[in-house]
Amino acid sequence: MPLIDHTTDVLVVGAGPVGLTAAGELRRRGVPVRVVDRLPARLPYAKAVGIQPRTLEVWDRMGLVRDVLEAAVPMRGQMVYVNGAEQGAYDLVLPPEVPYGFAALPQYETERILERFLARFGTSIERGTELVGFRQDQDGVTARLVTTSGPGGAAAPVHREEEVRCRYLVGCDGAHSVVRKGLGLGFEGGAFPDEYMLADVEVDWDLPAGYGVRAMHRGPDGAVDDVMVCIPLPGHGRYRISTTAPPALSTAGRTRDTGAGRDAVAHGLEGGPAPGLADIQKVLDRLSPQPVTASALRWSSVFRISHRIVDRYGEGRVFVAGDAAHIHPPTGAQGMNTGIQDAFNLAWKLALAVEGAAHPALLASYDAERRPVGEEVVGRTVRHAAEGVQADPEDPATLMLREAQLLVGYRGSPIVGSPDVAVDSARPRPGDRVPDCGGLTGPIATKALRLYDVLRERDHVLLLYGTGTGAPDEGFEQLARAAAESARGRLETCAVVRSADAAADAGRLPVYRDTRGEFARGFAAQAPTAFLVRPDGYLAARLHQPAPQTLAACLARVFRA
């Protein structure tokens, strides 16, 4: 078939949770996007199921978290058994100011929700469409796509080829990424020798709902020689069970065919015979803490695990995110969540670049901020897979925050902080996650708001904290005007004042009273301070006695002059 030429601003390759998050945020910001995926339909697999609190915060900022909360089930903790004896239950408890807990949702449900969100902006996934090559130049990227369609069966499929000219290309196409290979990125690491099997089943035990189960067997020498991990899913008695695959289901020696050639990366679901209900029942008979029968097998597969990370997250106008950039053991449900946060970090920066509002170096901060995160996650999950969470001797509270991905931050990033102001030791510091807080009231609404309610679906936000009596500190409106001008109109300003300032009036600025003092405590704010909050909910700058020129210098790291 002849080539058909099309154009778009951003081409996203891959319609998993990572690609859909990137596309959804870009479309929410008005950026024209095409999303292609080589699969003809969404896969009905409960692959990645754990959703971390930080990911829920990202989706809150986008305006879609409610749909996720209504579809997911809470992850309350994990029960551990050794040789059938209970060793204890670990509760997943976070500080009260964290707005969301841990959740579980089958990946296909996550994709359904994100796809529906994308459809709000008139964009759908182009299924059965595969990226087969691309080239880039100074002005854009030319991508070559092949779409396969037809009645199937004995009839020959129809292949349509087209070239798409886009300003940016984002590869969210998984561990066997065509985009990564096309860029020639390094992807060093290794593979675990064992093979595992996943199954989505129902079990009839009476263990507490909302708790995962980790059941192990120790041999005479004390070493663990068998293990099963069960994660609760929506539905009565439904779990995703993972365990070591028996030799009869081994895929060893098989090289994966990704649709774009042979691929030696041993990671992800494998072809070949899938585990049956009898295979899962044998595991339960060996390891379940109580007699149990498995039923209603929805899906199963054998999978392999590798640990690899790219040497850079992009080059020129082409970027990778999620499994295309980093793969590692599923320990702690870090992979999909890390990829989703990759996607959001990149999307808000790409939106500014497409609009011509970005500083020329802004897109380079994607690699500077996210690759260290990927390296840490790969290293930590490999340690935990080999030695357990005790491999990191942190106190339980810190370990919980790290697993929830609430400690991810960008201190030292080239786009946070002020170039001419000394770093303040108070927390949060530039690059830290902005904490949520409650008790914010306005002059009209009778119910108190959370800070995240104020930030939702906004771009950059300048929070001006005032401590004076009567009207907020002088110069608020002047700061707001200077900030909006430096951000090329892509910034909003809100004032936050102490609740004692009953007569507070910020003129044309929205003003919120910190009725319970939670904002002041959470931000360690004792004097007039400006807090510049990024679209992804991280603190870009913290300025005491802020001046317009200092604020402009901070914004100049992000926005084109």
Image (tube, helix red, strand yellow):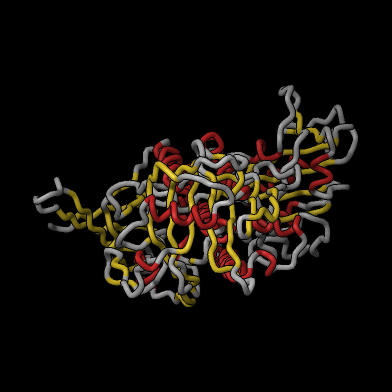
Residue 169 showing in the rendered view: no
Q: Residue at x 19, y 54 (%)?
A: 4
Left or right, residue 281 beside residue 515:
left
For residue 271, what is the image quadrant?
A: bottom left
Q: Position of residue 250 (x, y in %)?
A: 36, 68
Left or right, residue 430 beside residue 116:
right
Left or right, residue 529 beside residue 146:
right
Q: Which residue is drawn at 59% across and 51% down?
A: 289
The answer to which of 260 and 104 lies nearer the viewer is 104
For residue 287, what is the image quadrant?
A: bottom right
Q: Residue at x 59, y 55 (%)?
A: 214
Q: In which quarter of the image is the C terminus?
A: bottom right
The answer to which of 202 and 33 lies nearer the viewer is 202
Q: Where is residue 409 in the image (x, y as percent from the top left)?
A: 67, 60
Residue 483 showing in the rendered view: yes
For residue 511, what is the image quadrant?
A: top right
